């Protein structure tokens, strides 16, 4: 049986669902109590990103302002 930390099998057909304990361990490491809470976070992130992209399309200078704001907060890595 594959453990959570084993490399994935070469043949996807050999992939088995994670055991309950392995699923809980993965979610705990991600900081979420349940798969539903992790999924909710991903959906909220996706929706926020979609809104920002739509706003940038309407105001190209917004991308520059957001990038400057992230850089100021130290949340933007080097792009070069």
Image (cartoon, rainbow, N blue to C red):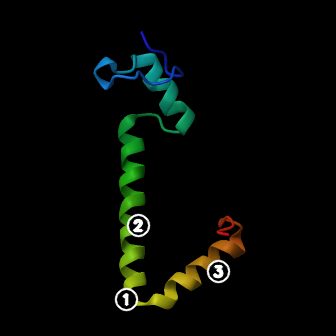
- Label 1 or label 2, whichever comes before in sequence order: 2
Label drawn at residue 58: 1
> Which of pointers 2 and 3 indicates the residue nearer the eye?
3
Using residue 35 as the reference point, say whether residue 75 is left or right of it.
Answer: right
Quadrant of image for the C terminus? bottom right
* Residue 57 figure quarter: bottom left
Instruction: Find residue 50 and report its horizontal and vertical position in percent.
Output: 36, 69
Using residue 50 as the reference point, say whether residue 4 is left or right of it.
Answer: right
Q: Secondary structure at mark 3?
A: helix
For marks 3 and 1, give the CA distance.
18 Å
Q: Secondary structure at mark 1?
A: helix
> Which of pointers 1 and 2 indicates the residue nearer the eye?
1
Label drawn at residue 68: 3
- Label 3 or label 1, whichever comes before in sequence order: 1
The residue lying at 48 percent from left, 16 percent from top is 3
For marks 2 and 3, give the CA distance.
18 Å
**Residue tagged 2:** 48
């Amino acid at each position: 049986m594959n453990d959570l930390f084993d490399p994935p099998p070469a043949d996807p057909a050999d992939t088995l669902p994670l055991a309950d304990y392995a699923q809980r361990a993965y979610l705990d490491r991600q900081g979420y109590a349940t798969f539903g809470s992790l999924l909710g976070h991903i959906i909220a992130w996706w929706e926020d990103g979609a809104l920002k992209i739509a706003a940038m399309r309407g105001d190209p200078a917004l991308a520059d302002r957001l990038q400057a704001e992230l850089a100021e907060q130290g949340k933007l890595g080097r792009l070069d």
